Amino acid sequence: MALYAAAAAVLAGVESRQGSIKGLVYASSFQNVKQLYALVCETQRYSAVLDSVISSAGLLRAEKKLRPHLAKVLVYELLLGRGFRGGGGRWKPLLNRHQARLKAELARLKVRRGVSRNEDLLEVGCGPGAASQVPRFVRVNTLKTCSDDAIDYFKRQGFSYQGRASSLEDLRALKGKCFLLDPLLPELLVFPAQTDLHEHPLYQAGHLILQDKASCLPAMLLAPPPGSHVIDACAAPGNKTSHLAALLKNQGKIFAFDLDAKRLASMATLLARAGVSCCQLAEEDFLAVSPSDQRYRQVQYILLDPSCSGSGMLTRQLEEPGTGLPSKERLRALAGFQQRALCHALTFPSLQRLVYSTCSLCQEENEDVVQEALQQSSGTFRLAPVIPSWPHRGLNTFPGAEHCLRASPETTLTGGFFIAVLERVEVPSSVSQTEVSAPELRSSPSPALKKKRRRRNAAAAPSMLLCTKQEGN
């Protein structure tokens, strides 16, 4: 039925921040705009509920030709809406084959949440306010402590540790003084959304970093081994930089650049509190940094998280869909800068792995930027496939875009985010393949390689101290 296809198209447009629901509905060719608008709004209200039911029932695995947005519309109509009383066309028999399983999963969800009505599920944070129910993620700073010690500390404070989470449902169900270990990141603790830890002694001492899960992924996926030289191209406010230092175990060098002096000053304070000692801060435009500078001859890893529209930030997700969207002019300007920064980063001669990330949901700042940079690299770099189990992938705008990751409150219980991992295709003969392989595949270095690294590190400059061009930092 044309109604369901139109609704799926509008939902996809809203998710990729192409416009508001109302604007996209009126821009569609569907004649009954009132009917279409109502169906899209109601489907979006129950978005998280539908995602959970569809996933638990294995609908998309069983019906591989069924697209996710269309599946969400159809399952809403079957379980929560009109029940295909308006027809349903060829989709009705397809959904009827899975009707019993879908209804059973919805019933199980109600039992788990202790509710009896469909509407009551929205009170648990699955409506338009899903962003307000994103859990409080807390990264344990391994430069100062370890996850086990942090967990024990919270347990002594009366918190109930529930172990490692096994699904998003475990995270959604968090209440009161319960907390979990994230299923993906071993140093990430997860607390209920309302948990405020800004006054917690471990946070104030730098043992904990309050950082959204999606924001933790760039450093984790870059995965520089201890002793590496890394560039953090647009570093402030510094959470990702401190994460990189923890992965390096303060062994190696981080060259961190940012043009905003005030943000750099705050960043210096954050890094000092976190115990970071391997980082050089510079109030400098990354685009002005010369790849041929001898200081960066050993840089094999670059994290590029440039200025963006922020359309995926939780504070904006809490607004009505379509509000606060960047203008086309601002998007073009941002995308132009992001494109130049990414292409510039790919010219560093020893670069082997780069992570490009934004807190934007706009295709212009994400897939479009990556696609253009790959084309300009003339086959030197490619997208690396990462976290195959991650449920939200890049928009299908070019071949390989599915290797990119997207995040949102509805699909991953995080802020809105985009991540692409680029790796060099041809490895220079002077660089070991083991050193530059993806983190999922990296094996332990050989004794000869370890000895070579020790000689190289001994010949490098003395240990870098935290410094900026600002007085008092």
Image (spheres, grey):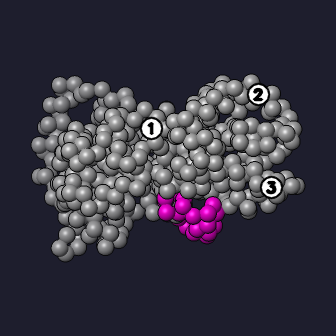
Asked if the stretch drawn in magenta spans residue 322, the answer is yes
State the CA–CA distance, disc 2 to disc 3: 28 Å
State the CA–CA distance, disc 1 to disc 2: 29 Å
Residue name at image x 26 percent, y 52 percent: 208
Kindly tell me whether residue 430 is visible in this rendering: yes
Kindly state the secondary structure of the residue where label 2 is placed: helix
Of badges 2 and 3, nearer the viewer stands 2
Residue matched to label 1 = 170
Residue name at image x 18 percent, y 36 percent: 453
Q: Is residue 50 left or right of residue 299?
A: right
State the CA–CA distance, disc 1 to disc 3: 38 Å
Mark 3: amino acid: Ser
Q: Quadrant of residue 18?
A: bottom right
Q: Nearer the viewer, residue 12 or 174?
A: 174
Q: Is residue 63 left or right of residue 467?
A: right
Asked if the stretch drawn in magenta spans residue 447, the answer is no
Residue matched to label 3 = 28
Residue 352 image point, x, y percent: 37, 41
> Would you place residue 83 above or below residue 95 in this image?
below
Residue matched to label 2 = 96
Residue 250 image point, x, y percent: 19, 47
Kindly state the secondary structure of the residue where label 3 is placed: loop
**Disc 1 + disc 3, Cβ < 8 Å:** no
Q: Nearer the viewer, residue 271 or 297?
A: 271
